[in-house]
Amino acid sequence: MEILVCAKRVPDTSENEIQLNPAGNDIERDDLVYSINEADNYAVEEALQIVAKAGGSVTVATVGDEDDEEILRREMAMGANRGVLISDDAFHGSDGCGIARILKAFVQKGNYDLILTGVQAEDGAAQIGGMLAAMLDYPFASLVNSIELLDGKRLKICREIEGGNREVNEIDLPCVLSIQTGINEPRYVGMRGIRAVASVPIPTMRAADLGIDVGSVGEATAKVKRVDYFVPALGKGAEILQGNREANIDKVLELLEAKGGLR
Amino acid sequence: MPQIFCYVTHKNGTTDDAAAELAAAARKIDPAAFPAAILTGFGPALDAACSSLPGTFSEIWKVPNEALAYANAELIRKAVVKVLPPNSIVLLSHEHFGIDLAPGLSIKMNAAFVSDAVEIEGLEGSTLKLVRQEFGGQISAHVRCDISSGAVITIRPGAFKPLEAISTRTAVVEKSIEVGALTAGRRYRETIIAEVGDVDITKQNILVSVGRGIQDKDNVAIAEELAEVLGAAVSCSRPVVDAKWLLKSRQVGSSGKTVKPKVYLACGISGASQHLAGIKGGFLIAINKNRKAPIFQVADVGIVDDILEFLPELTSKVREMRTVSAK
């Protein structure tokens, strides 16, 4: 099975507090720690587990620039066979639809049976997988939290629906699945693994390599644009206890009793 | 002004409560708009759903087809694309079905797509101004969307105050268009209902709920000890389940359990909207070392502290109290 995982490098929210910059138009990007989007990492692990059972190879691709190479290398250290950087100045400012259009061109240069994305990235849009599938006229399923191989042509998948319930579906290959976090336990990547792939060349694909009309992507064609970031005026918000720890503990106990929780 | 449609989901003949929220969002796009509802399905269940819809819409477009009896996003997309007038605006609720349908629908409509909108600031010419959240609600963003060739927008559940009914009865318009043979590359098989697990977190007076801030599997014991002395149970947010530190049955949120304890102690939980969606009542006390965590915007009382130090001290204090009162 030939599997493509579309991944993205994002500011790591477990390592950073995301704050507004002094100009108030973007997040503070100085000293940000970046990593692969968490759900994308689960998608790569899932791809590796499928290939371990069914054979084939795993390609990880990202639309970005040189800085984004590091996540490709990290996923190769995990076991992905190939990393591809899809990069062109003409891609800058693309909206979700533009990114999906770029990925579609990349997919059509290959021969993939299965395409995985993470369910959502740091912007929470959860859009690329569904858009890409529609452009390719492939079946699609979002929020996938288990994959089972049925035969060479179909998968049995579960989707995470409300209340922790799971919707079981059968889906034809080739297809696009957006992978939910928690589907597996991504393997650990040590420094040794990273060093082992440090000098493996990572090809860069430009618009021309993919036959992309530069007039169909990028900022000029984006129908959706983020203007700025901001911190909304707080509503009532919590009453923040200002005491020392001991006083705060007493207050919590008082509240537990007053609100009827503590017996 | 393009026509605005609210795609309304339904189950067992009853429409989703979010319908009135979608109608409210439509009004924010155009205060003069009377949005239409669009429902797909088949047979008596679809008829019942159409009649159960409160009078918040100008009309109800009913799209009946046997192949649409189960809500399969791929088939519904094919049908809806054929029914909608050009350049329509379609609103859907940002939950598992909307996430499945909306992005692909926008492609097939050649329309703009905005997901998980929490506010709509209005329309200027063909530019719609919206607000979204990024980084798990840590920061908000103003978004501009060109709707001149239509738009598909998913709406954050609970973000818009439901629109009150404006009429008692809404005309149902049947749109039994020729959709041709509807076949899908994805076929529904069954629904597996979540297990209750060893402890039913929906039936607790107090929940000690832990998030990413618990940092390590071994630290979960800190919360368990506190829960034990309080006669409470431990619940958690999604990252803790993803990391396999607690069972799925302990997860609070839109993809976990909906809980209503008397007191909810949110410990090291940032407060992503999907988590908050599962807390339906009770007094919310948040403990988090990040003063800017979104949980503090919704909590009743907040404490800025490290849970790994705060919780054990709280446990000792309760034990101490219990010993004194036992004497």
Image: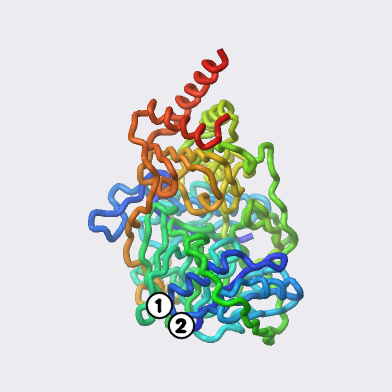
CB within 8 Å, label 2 to label 1: yes
The quadrant holding residue A225 is bottom left
Residue B146 - label: 1
Q: Is A130 on the left or on the right of A218, as rendered?
A: right
Residue B149 - label: 2
Inter-mark Cα distance, 2 to 1: 8 Å
Where residue A155 sits: x, y (%)?
69, 60
Residue B122 - label: none
User: For numbered disc 2, what is the local secondary structure?
Assistant: loop
Where residue B200 sits: x, y (%)?
66, 40
* Chain on which label 2 sits: B
For this orientation, the residue located farthest to the left is A23
Q: Specify the quadrant that holds the C terminus of chain A.
A: top right
Q: Is residue B67 above or below residue A171?
A: below
The answer to whether any part of residue A132 appears in the image is no
Numbered label tally: 2
Q: Is B46 on the left or on the right of B264, as rendered?
A: right
